[in-house]
């Protein structure tokens, strides 16, 4: 199964969950208190749909084998909405700072303001990287930690400060679920951008991205319905706009990543665990895998033979000294070398001397004709010459 097949259940559950949530907020929930006036059983069905979606996405992701590695490429769509998310974070940070300074708010507004600025910087870097196609996070991994920082602080504030008194309101619980999904997705995305995880990080990031997008959309429904009924207010909706920008930014990444991870992976890049699984008796290897494995085995064998031939040639024979070059070798026959350029002198016994010299066995050269073979006699002779020179 390919990783891009996750789009099928995502689209189906999105078409069911979002309209159902809109119907609940518009007709079944009291806008003043946030509690259900009726139709609580429908809300249980809604939660069951979300749980079933999580289960299906996890099972389908686990069944995706031999996914390729994610390669950072140019993505104009994600770059645009990364800029939009950065702008919304900056505006939300300014609003929190005003609450802290003018209205004498608590310390959490100052912390949210500072983390909003850091998150803005991270998404500005992400936008530039998507526009240019150059992964800046690979060279500066610390910046990747700023991606989930703003969401992490929001999760702490929502879980332990704002929603501690009333946790039965459906919108509050979905908001916490949305922020936690956003946090896990951005943390996995930061590891994917920096390349510090295994190749399985790609499909894990895609899985968390689909979960985050669905949870965030159903969590943003109450604010969307309120904006349609009562009008949209920019002064108090920067977090809502930042969440929508993150959703669109994530969708652009999911399109790119799912297409890349669904490409056939070369056999040489398959992990050892998957190779053992493919070669197990229960799962016979495919013809393509057998073909590529035979090519790799032949290539490795040829490489080993070439290495074995190159190893003797790497041992350079030491050059003899100048005195030794002028001195004749011990194995050479002076009579043969002296008579090599002379003709037999008849009448002075030259013919007998020529026949005697030519009948002697000429010693073999000190260096073998095979360039890959080292003559040990020649090496021993060099050692003796060096010893005599030192003495």
Image: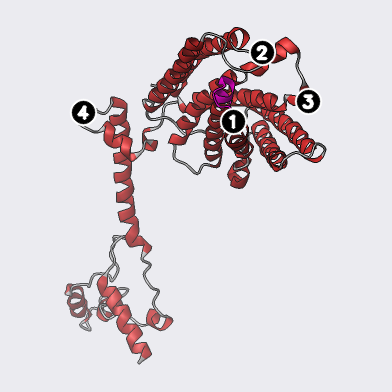
Q: Which residue lies furthest to the right in this view?
A: 102
| Magenta extent | 164-175
Q: Nearer the viewer, residue 64 or 221?
A: 221
| Closer to viewer: mark 4 or mark 3 | 3
- Residue depicted at 60% across the width and 7% down the height: 27
Q: Is residue 80 magenta?
A: no
- Residue depicted at 33% across the width and 50% down the height: 306
Label 3 packing within 10 angstroms: few (<14), some (14-19), many (20+): few
For the residue labelled by badge 1, is the local secondary structure a helix, a strand or a loop?
loop
From this view, report whether residue 337 is shown above or below residue 156. below
Report if residue 12 is visible in the image: no
| Closer to viewer: mark 1 or mark 4 | 1
Label 2 packing within 10 angstroms: few (<14), some (14-19), many (20+): some
**Image quadrant of residue 388?**
bottom left
Q: Which dot marks residue 165? A: 1
Q: Tell me how far mark 2 sits from mark 3, CA to CA.
A: 17 Å
Q: Check disc 3 and report the residue beneath it.
A: 235
Tell me if label 2 and label 4 are in contact, CB under 8 Å.
Answer: no
Q: Is residue 165 magenta?
A: yes
Which badge, 1 or 4, is on the more N-terminal residue? 1
Q: Check disc 2 and report the residue beneath it.
A: 225
Label 1 packing within 10 angstroms: few (<14), some (14-19), many (20+): few
The image shows residue 56 at horizontal and vertical percentages of: 41, 20
Q: Nearer the viewer, residue 345 or 211?
A: 211
Which badge, 1 or 2, is on the more N-terminal residue? 1
**Image quadrant of residue 189?**
top right
The image shows residue 86 at horizontal and vertical percentages of: 71, 32
| Closer to viewer: mark 1 or mark 3 | 1
| Closer to viewer: mark 2 or mark 4 | 2
Q: Check disc 4 and report the residue beneath it.
A: 282
Tell me if label 1 and label 4 are in contact, CB under 8 Å.
Answer: no
């Amino acid at each position: 199964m390919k990783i891009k097949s996750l789009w099928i259940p995502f689209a189906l559950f999105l078409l069911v969950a979002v309209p159902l949530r809109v119907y609940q907020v518009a007709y079944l929930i009291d806008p003043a208190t946030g509690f259900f006036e009726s139709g609580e059983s429908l809300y249980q069905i809604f939660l069951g749909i979300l749980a079933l979606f999580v289960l299906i996405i996890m099972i389908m992701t686990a069944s995706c084998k031999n996914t390729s590695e994610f390669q950072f490429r140019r993505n104009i769509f994600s770059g645009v909405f990364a800029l939009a998310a950065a702008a919304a974070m900056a505006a939300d940070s300014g609003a929190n700072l005003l609450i802290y300074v003018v209205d004498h708010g608590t310390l959490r507004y100052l912390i949210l303001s500072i983390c909003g600025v850091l998150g803005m910087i991270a998404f500005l870097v992400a936008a530039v990287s998507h526009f240019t196609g150059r992964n800046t996070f690979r060279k500066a991994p610390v910046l990747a930690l700023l991606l989930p920082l703003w969401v992490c602080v929001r999760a702490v504030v929502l879980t332990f400060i704002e929603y501690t008194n009333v946790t039965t309101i459906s919108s509050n619980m979905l908001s916490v679920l949305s922020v936690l999904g956003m946090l896990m997705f951005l943390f996995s995305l930061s590891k994917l951008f920096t390349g510090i995880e295994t190749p399985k990080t790609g499909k894990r990031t895609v899985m968390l991205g689909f979960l985050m997008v669905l949870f965030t959309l159903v969590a943003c429904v109450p604010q969307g319905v309120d904006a349609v009924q009562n009008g949209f207010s920019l002064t108090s909706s920067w977090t809502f706009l930042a969440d929508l920008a993150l959703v669109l930014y994530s969708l652009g990444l999911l399109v790119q990543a799912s297409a890349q991870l669904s490409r056939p992976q070369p056999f040489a890049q398959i992990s050892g665990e998957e190779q053992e699984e493919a070669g197990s008796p229960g799962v016979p290897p495919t013809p393509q895998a057998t073909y590529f494995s035979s090519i790799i085995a032949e290539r490795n064998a040829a490489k080993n033979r070439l290495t074995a031939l190159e190893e003797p040639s790497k041992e350079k024979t030491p050059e003899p000294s100048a005195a030794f070059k002028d001195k004749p070798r011990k194995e050479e026959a002076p009579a043969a070398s002296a008579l090599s350029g002379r003709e037999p002198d008849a009448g002075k016994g030259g013919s007998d001397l020529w026949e005697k010299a030519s009948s002697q066995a000429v010693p073999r050269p000190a260096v073998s004709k095979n360039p890959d073979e080292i003559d040990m006699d020649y090496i021993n002779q060099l050692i003796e010459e060096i010893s005599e020179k030192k003495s």
